Image (cartoon, rainbow, N blue to C red):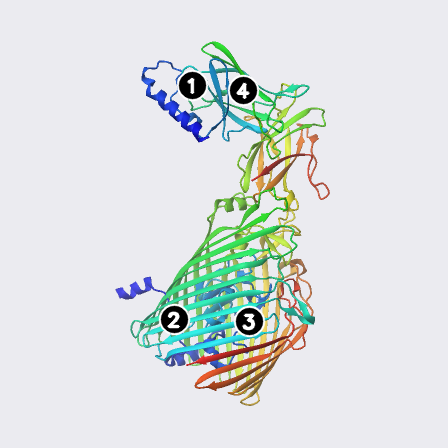
Amino acid sequence: MKSKYIFLFIMSALFAACSSDNNDDDYTPTPNDVENLTLVSEISNDNHTIEIYTKTGMLYTGHNNISLRVKNNATNAYFSHVTFDSWMPVMQMTEMSHACPKTDISKIENTNALYGMQAVFQMTNPDASGWSFTFNYTINNEAYTAQNTVEIWQNDHQNVTTFMGSDGSKYILALIQPENPKIGINNMVVGLYTMESMMSFPKVANYSLTLDPRMPGMGNHSSPNNTALTYNTSTTLYNGDLSLTMTGYWKLNLKLLDSEGTILKGEDVTDTNEASSLYLEIEF
Amino acid sequence: MKSLLACIVFCFCLSSYAQNIPTNTKETDTTEITHLSEVVVIGRHKLNNYKQEKALSSIDDYLEKSSKVSMIKRGNYAWEPTINNMTSERISVTIDGMQIFGACTDKMDPVTSYVDVSNLEKVTISSGQQGSQQANSIGGNINMQLPTPKYYNTGLKSSIDLGYETNGNYKSSGLDLEYSGNKLFLAFDGIYRDSDNYKAGNDQEINYSQFNKYNLSFLAGYKLSEKHSLEGQLIYDRATDVGYPALPMDVSLAEATIASITHKYQSDTTLIRKWESKLYLNTITHIMDDSQRPDVPIRMDMPGWSDTYGGFSKAEFTLGAHQLQASLNAHYNKSLAEMTMYPNDPNQNAMFMFTWPDVRTLYSGFFLKDSWRFKKQQRLEFGVRIGYHNNKIGNTTGLESLQIFYPNMSDSKSRLLKSFSINYVLKHKALTHNFGIGYGERAPSVSEGYGFFLFNSFDNYDYIGNPYLNNEKSFEASWTSGFSNGKLDVALDVSFFHIKDYIIGEIDPTLSAMTIGASGVRRYTALSHANMFNTALEATYKFSKTFSANAALGYNYGKGSGNKKLPLIAPLSYSAQLSYNTSKFSAALQLNAHGKQHEYSKAFGEDQTPDYAVLNLNLGNYMTVKANRLVLKYGVENIFDTLYSTYADWNNVPRPGRNFYANVSYIMF
């Protein structure tokens, strides 16, 4: 990992040294774009290399914040004006293939050449295989394609779940926040997507989710002052308060209600029913 | 003057009024009748008084003899003292005026457990606002006084104590060295105690009732001049492997370091008669663990720390018929406790929380007392204390934990605490009367204000603190009367407390218990009021110079608003003693008994405690061996091996059965 940084640093230092006589305005001298990020993998075609970054250097099942930048293989410089026409994460299974919920790729503010997107990987193979990314992008009015496999690892905890609602639709629910849970009241954010087709997973608006966090290891201890997760029109995600009284393993029991208040999935936790069939997990 | 100020700033020492110094005897006589304070003399410094049955009794045993005090027992060690049936939160316990606070969230380490008899000269118990001299409290004060250096030029004196008790195979030993010069005083003492499980009546072994501890104390005094002296004191106390049969956890370590330096000024001729200034610090580490328990729902560690820094300066003046006492004191305490639970599934992360979120308490206060002898046999006493009290949460995670329950709470809370008292004292021939009224306030304790899921095994509930609690306010009235004609002594003591905003935990059905198996969660809140009434009657009759009889009777009552019975109120108690004393031999037959507990608080986990009576026999021999003194004490406690527990025994754990004990003390001059 360290050698990668050193490499990047040396590379950028080299380019900085000859920047005065380089007129290519795609040239980006700053290495700070990827500060605090770690390279996950590279996808190359004849002209360019797309470097994929996350904070941890890994992609996991569940919600991922992904960053990327495009390198000119000829000059090793990074392009600051790339138009991503589309990208498609696809998981190849034995008899079929499917995509996952994702956002479009856009330039990250206050960076020179860094682009970002989010994706929710709902599953993977135990050896992290199965997924490939395809990028269609335009640089200087010329269209390019790059494609390769990426490793996506199984998260230790259920931070994403796929289920059939009582309305017959298939849904994907993913935990987005808290990324770093704390003892106290956490801002909880989840994304809710419906599976329109194997390749299309639009967000669902105006539903709601009840929240009941429990510690199965502590006699199903619960916490007070949790709120239901409600739809936020500006983020198009669902927000609520999640109280965690201690560190450890928490099961976040949920019930999904549509805009009419009909229960689509999940049950109340009671003395006889230890957990809802719809839940997410946190351990910290 | 400059050097004096410098001394005050840089020095600390040990206080306690030098009642042993002959020039002060007169004053001592007059103050004793005016104080409601009860003095329990303890410590080997007074050993030659032959006052105690056992030279190496614990402080707890001594305190229990006071009619004002009862001890709540969670095991055979570290009992929690109560005054007027009020527990730790409502009373103050000080060591020579030094503030010190236990580090255990479950009250397994009352302050009294961090000193030993070898450290102390005496313990002063003051009821109600009489105790405001030391701190703001409701129920009273226990001040444990350390010995005062004496510049008698008597040279080296040493003593050795050894003790053994059959019940629990309890061994104790003590060593005491003391050097007294003209200007220099040095003293060292050490004590070691080790006990296995004790057996209750009928040979029933009480598991997890063992303990082991030692205590070391150093005292140095230097007389700068006739009027000025400097003193330094260091106490180190360490208990390990302490079992608590009434609780689900034990203690692997309870450790305290208590240090102080004092400057003292004393003069009979100047306006200021006495002036004492002290700087002190103490630090406590308390580690609870359950590694000795075979069956627990979940393994956990619960360490706690309490550090206190403080100082005071107090002076006594005489202005005509007025005797004035003024003091300024301040202290800063840090209380932090945490809990880590280890899930039964080893793949899961440990569960961690702050049970005391690093609460910083800053207190500064002013106390003034005027004792006005307006007639020869009558005096009025006025006392007032004003204190500023601030709590601040030093740990962000701790604050955010509590904000789960109180989303808008801030990290800081300040309070003004007020107290005053008036006493009228009349001495008429053989009769002494004292009538007093008082008003006092106290701030909630760290647990009451900021506790986070503190499990109380008494009522089986988890407790959550409440930072919004009001000050608890007490209106009190007291009456004591005494008759003494040399043959017959009779004393009656009555006190009444009306307490507003009485802090207590109430069930919050919306909250989910944290502790596995707990019945639910109680949140600290306040009853609009509570009334407490305590009375004690004691009589001693001397048949002859050597033979006397003593009897005592106590009755207590406590009820909250809404007719709620308060927990831990003593039932009718009585005791009797026949004593025979000569200079060579002593014998005492003691009866201690409680009536059936008619009034008990079911809501707070109490059940009815049946009546009991136990009989003890104490004997002593006093010999002189080559100008040294040998004291032998021996006897039997609970002669009939009665199986019993008292209302103050946590979860009804039975008290020790029959116990033979022997103590030998050798004092070398």
Between tags 1 and 3, which lies in front? 3
Whether tag 2 and tag 4 are in contact, CB under 8 A, the answer is no
How many other residues sit within 10 Å of disc 3, few (<14), some (14-19) or many (≥20)? Answer: some
Residue B451 x, y percent position in the rendering:
55, 52
Q: Amino acid at mark 3?
A: Lys
Please tell me whether mark 2 sits on a helix, a strand or a loop: strand
Return the chain for callout 4. A
Subunit bearing disc 3? B
| Same chain letter for marks 1 and 4 | yes
* Tag 4 residue: A104
Q: Amino acid at mark 4?
A: Asp
Q: Are marks 3 and 2 in contact (CB under 8 Å)?
A: no
The relative height of residue A150 versus residue B432 in the rendered view (above or below) is: above
Residue mark closest to the camera, 1 vs 4: 1
Inter-mark Cα distance, 2 to 1 = 84 Å
Which quadrant holds the C terminus of chain B? Answer: bottom left
Q: Identify the residue position indicated by label 1 in the image.
A: A78
Q: Nearer the viewer, residue B11 or A255?
A: B11
Q: Which residue is mark 3?
A: B171
Q: What is the x, y in percent for residue B518?
A: 65, 52
- The chain letter for the residue carrying disc 2 is B
> Which residue position is annotated with label 2?
B324
- Residue A55 as seen in the image, left or right of residue A92: left
Task: Tell me the element at label 4.
Answer: loop
Q: Nearer the viewer, mark 2 or mark 4?
A: 4
Pointers 2 and 1 within a single chain:
no
Residue B602 seen anywhere in this rendered image of the structure: yes
Which of the 4 image quarters holds residue B77? bottom right
Co-location on one chain, circles 2 and 4: no
Determine the CA span between mark 1 and mark 4.
Answer: 20 Å
Name the residue nearer the viewer: A37 or B381.
Answer: A37
Say which chain tag 1 marks.
Answer: A
